[in-house]
Image (tube, helix red, strand yellow):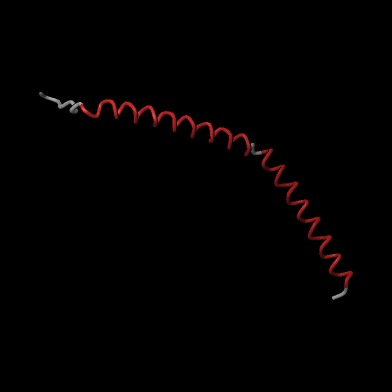
Amino acid sequence: MSNEHVTAGLVILLIALGIFLLLRALMCWYWKIGRRIELMEEHNALLERQLKVLEAIRDKGSGVEPHRDGE
């Protein structure tokens, strides 16, 4: 293989990589992937806060016997 073939192959590879990255960024923007990730992270944070509150409620009431129907 000559130097020209190697150089041409590298140029084509770099161009293909550039096009891929450009199209990837365009698709992420179009489908709002970044915004979805932000919303999921916010949702996870809220769920973690909710879990902590529920655990605190459970721990406070751990000394109380559960209510039994019919008694």
Front residue of 4 and 62: 62
* Foreground residue among 51 and 1: 51
Residue plotted at (32% across, 26% down): 57
Task: Report the residue that reaches farthest toward the bottom.
Answer: 1
Q: Is residue 42 rendered to the left or right of residue 9?
A: left
Nearest to the observer: residue 48 or residue 37: 48
- What percent of the width, then of the height, locates residue 65? 18, 28
**Residue 58: horizontal and vertical position, in percent?**
29, 29
Q: Quadrant of the C terminus?
A: top left
Residue drawn at x 54%, y 35% is 41
Relative to 5, is 63 above or below? above
Residue 30 lies, with reference to residue 1, above or below; the image says above
Residue 37 in percent (x, y) is at 58, 37
Q: Position of residue 11 (x, y in %)?
A: 84, 60
Residue that protrudes farthest toward the left in the picture: 71
Q: Please give left or right for residue 9 compared with residue 34 in the image.
A: right
Residue at the spot 62% in from the left edge and 34% down from the top edge? 35
Instruction: Name the residue: 41% across, 29% down.
Output: 50
45, above or below 6, in the image: above
Task: Place residue 38 in its image quadrant.
Answer: top right
| Image side of residue 4 versus residue 54, left or right | right
Front-most of 22 and 30? Answer: 22
Q: Quick check: 8 above or below 43?
A: below
Direction from residue 48 to residue 65 in the image, left or right: left
Q: Quadrant of residue 4?
A: bottom right
